[in-house]
Every structure is written in structure tokens, then in C-alpha cells.
Amino acid sequence: MSEFTVGDTDFLLDGRPVRLLSGALHYFRVHEAQWGHRLAMLRAMGLNCVETYVPWNLHEPRPGAYDDVGALGRFLDAAREAGLWAIVRPGPYICAEWENGGLPHWLTGRPRTGDEEYLGHVERWFRRLLPQVVDRQWGRGGPVILVQVENEYGSYGSDAGYLRWLADLLRAEGVTVPLFTSDGPEDHMLSGGSLPGVLATVNFGSRARAAFDTLRRHRPGGPLMCMEFWCGWFDHWGAEHVVRDPGDAAAALREILECGASVNLYMAHGGTSFAGWAGANRGGDLHDGTLEPDVTSYDYDAPIDELGLPTEKFWAFREVLAEYADAPLPELPAHPAQLAAPAEVALTDWAPLGRVLETLGGPETLSPVPPTFEELDVDRGVVRYEVTVPGPRQPYPLTARGLRDLAVVYVDGEPAGVLTEGDERLREPVGGHARVELWVESLGRVTYGPRTGEAKGITGGLLHERQYLHGVRARGLRLDALDAPADVERVPLLPLTGPGAPGPRGEPGAPGLYRGTLTVRGAGDALLELPGWTRGFVWINGCNLGRYWSTGPQRTLFVPGPVLREGGNDVWLLELAGTAARAPYVRSR
């Protein structure tokens, strides 16, 4: 039986030294029908391995309720068919600019340590997940050669007992291939995140020799590997698009390989954070500052772009990697079909947000203080909070303390302003008697740093001057409530033309749910343009393409060709802020 092992200086396949030339490609960020093409693109770039994380929250939305855990196994089967080894990073925490770093929202408040409740949930999850990995290990006919213990744990904590418990759990559940950890090339990270007897790897974007020197101070032996070579970077809403010069990235890759090390390109192909799964970061040196929501596209300025096309960086990397290949590199696969002709969405109907909430929302609660999103079981979506300002009383400032992340406020049904985490007080004072509604939206849970796992919603109470307002009604709308076309069809709609359309005063472009039809010729990969639309989500044929936001830098949403069908396509847009209501349209690149 063939065996993959960790030697004193190299990875060994049946005793023969091998170098891992790997690329990160997340199965959950690529439409399944396009996995084969993207994996073939990795081969064509000169890679012999693929790496993927596993997002726990995607597969266990509620404790003990699982959703398509088999997707990982199908992806690993596709990797084997493509002739690639596979590295699996099951977490339980993954970072990955993914909502809550992959941890379920219902775990909020549980630390990544030896906390008994947390460990119980992890054990249950791993026992459900790991058969997908164990049955596909190298030596059993599968591609899996390495499995990670936790993820960059040294950036978070130093509980060595927790890491050992995880490693023992992986072994007990049947993982026999080598285990590894990965951390930044800093002493405190490597000391906090590594385990004796388990291969330690490092993550960085440049200065390979210095990074490996740091690793060698902690681990004198074992193969060198950069588990995340950051060849690009991700974008935040409202910030500039981040790019890295292809020549600079190729030179950094060459330095890694000249050190005799293995490498994993992060990302080789980023894909898309569909369905509102993009997370958020905190600014500042300690990752404890201003919220920075991540955009829907996870293009990452990777060598294979969001549409699966080769970039200048692809060709620069291919030239470097070809020097380390055992055979001539394969030709590029044919690219998936592109949309043949532009097409406009014909919008026909509309429903106000309140009507959508009444039809598809969760149960309404009444409590002295505002419940959090987690208490309302809302992972991605919005919550409407309602409170009465008693009267008579003179106007006072109204403040949503501890707001996470954004609230559109109405006073007696009239728009009164938008609040954010850094601007929690309404500009105009509110007098009583008045009815106040706050539609609060989560912009993505934090994926990295000490503020991972923080709650969403109004977490500190509603203040009128210095007095808390009690008796808060709250109701949540989960994004996945709109994923089933049959459920969305139950929302009572108004025509977009004629009396009562749309909005409380008949004005066009009010917040709400819009329905339309997209008729296409030559279905294939496309980009959706949303001119005049402000902030919300789009579904085509039941597939949530993700968040759009006019603040940029992302201006289009990727529509995978397999989502579209020839002829008519159903389109729903959940606009949360109000829009010019111009027709969206799709186009090819």
C-alpha cells in the first residue's frame, strides 16, 4: 500500500522525496458544476495538489441539523479525477474571510479552548464530517495526504491541551495521514499554535528566508512549507481594490521554492462568497478596531480570477512552477461558455420589507432589552426592532448602543436616518409618543482576531437621552428563508406600475423585495450589473449571488453559467436601503 509521510527534511511518497506545489481552492466558493474546470486550471498552472478549508457553519446551520456534508467528499473525488493530491483544513475555525471564521453563529460566546460545551459541539461535528476525509485518504485510493489541526491558533490562543485534544480526536476518528499546524512566522504564534510531534508550517506573503529561519528556531527538522503564500489579498466594502504586482508575487514564489520548500498558493482561485457568507475584519494593528466588511467577490487578485480565467499572474507563476515540474505542463482546459448576449431584467412586482418579514420571518419576540441576532437564530439577514417612545415627552437623542452593524431607522413610519457602529445616535431628536423601527443588518461576522465570535444586533440597549427604552419587539429575517422559490412566491406582491406601487407614499425605489424575469440567449457565465441599486442581495433561479453595495469597490456580481437557463430566469432582489430602481442587466466579461 502506498504511503505518504513526513521525513526529516522532505515529504516522502513511498520513501521518495516529493515537493508539494499546492493551490487553495474552496469547494464552497465555486459552483459544483465548475469544480472540474478550476481543478484542471490548477494542473495547467503547474500544481500537483489542491487545498481546501471546510466551513462548519455552512454545513451545520443549527445544532445537529446538517446540510450537504457530502459536498467535501465529492470535491475530493473531483480532485482525484483531476490527478491532484489534496490537503484538508477542517478547522473547526478556518478564518478564510468567511462568516464568523466558519464557526456557527449558535456558538457565539464559546471560546476556542478546552471549554466543555464547545468541545462537545466540535466532537459531534467532526464525527459527522471526518468520514468524508477518512475514506479518501492516500493509501485508500483517495487524494488526501495532509490534514490540519485547527487553524492559525497561535494568532488566537495558547491552549496546548485543546490542540492536543483536537489532534487526538482526528486520530481517533480514523485520520492516519500526517497532521500539521499553520501559523504566522512569529515566535508567539508558532509557540502558541504548534504541537510536539505534529508538522509545523508557516503563512506569509514575502521574505521567505526570514520566515523559514523563524520556523527553524522552533522546529530544527522536518520539511519546510509555506501553507499560505499570500499571492494576493481580499477587498473590503468602501475601500480600494487590492492588487499585487505579478512580477513581485512570482519573485516571492521563486524565493520559497529556492529554499527547497513546498508551497500552497493562497489563493490559487478564490471564487465567490455566495449567499452572504462573506465575513468581516476589524481594523488596527490588534484587529480590534473599525469593522471592515468583506466584499462578495473572493477574487483575491489570484492567478485564476473569479470567472476562472488565467491572469498575468497565472502565466508568471506557470513559468516559475514549470522549472520544478516532473513533466511538461498540460494545456489549459477549455473555458466554460460565456453569456452570448447582454440581457435586461424586466422588473414586474414588489413587496415592502414589512410584508416580506411577516411572510418569511421568524417568530416575533417581546423582551425588556433588544435580543441579539444569535438569540433570534439569525445567522445572515436582518432584524426589525420596534420600540415605543412614551409620551408626552420632549425630543431627546435616540441611541442604539452596541450596534452591530447597520440600522435603517423609521419614526412613525417615516425614514429618520441610518446608524452605524461608529455613529449610533440619530441626528434628529425623537419626541414622544412615537413608534420607532430599526431594521438592523449584519454586514458579516468577524473572521480573525480577538473579536471573533462577537454578537450581532443591538447589543447594548436603546437609549432615549439617558433612559433605556424597554419592551422591545424583535423579529428576524434569515437570508436562507428566500432560497426556496416556492416559499418566496408566498409573499404578497404589488405591481411596479399603477396605484400603490411601490413604497408607503407611492414613490419608486423603496426598500423591499423586487421580482423580475431575465430572458437570456446563449446561457453561460455572466456578470450582473445593478445601476442605481444601493445595498441588498440577489437571487437568480433560487441561487443567492451574494451582497451588492454601491459603496464599492465591487461593482458586479458573478453569475455562474450553470445557474442560468436558456430563456426565462426568475430574479428576486432584496433591496434594504432604497434604490433608483433602474433595471439590472447581465453581460459577459
Image (tube, helix red, strand yellow):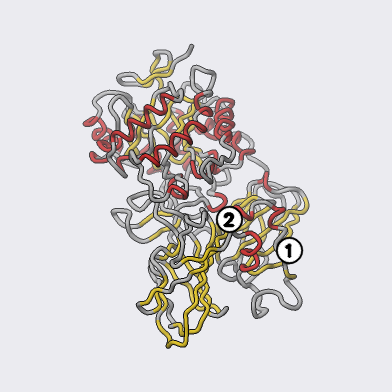
Residue at point 69%, 49% (across, down): 339
Q: Residue furthest top?
A: 1
Residue 69, position in %: x, y?
56, 36
- Whole-angstrom CA distance, mark 2 to mark 1, is 23 Å
Name the residue that disc number 1 marks.
346
Q: Nearer the viewer, residue 528 or 120?
A: 120
**Picture coordinates of residue 125, whole percent (x, y):** 48, 36
Q: Residue sitting at 47 percent across and 44 percent down?
A: 302
Q: Earlier along the polypeptide chain: callout 2 or callout 1?
A: 1
Q: Nearer the viewer, residue 381 or 154?
A: 381
Local packing at callout 2 (Cα closer than 10 Å; few below 14, some 14-19, many 20+) is many
Residue 191 position in % (x across, y down): 25, 36
Position of residue 332 measured from the top left corner of the image (x, y, whole percent): 58, 34
Viewer-side label of 2, 1? 2
Label 2: element kind: helix
Q: Which mark is residue 479?
A: 2
The answer to whether 418 is drawn above or below residue 485 in the figure is below
Of the residues shown, which amino acid type is indicated by label 1?
A: Ala
- Rendering quarter of residue 496: bottom right
Circle 1 SS class: strand
Name the amino acid type tagged 2. Answer: Leu
Residue 519 numbered tag: none
Circle 1: is it few (<14), some (14-19), or many (20+) Cα within 10 Å?
some
Q: Residue at x 39, y 71 (%)?
A: 423
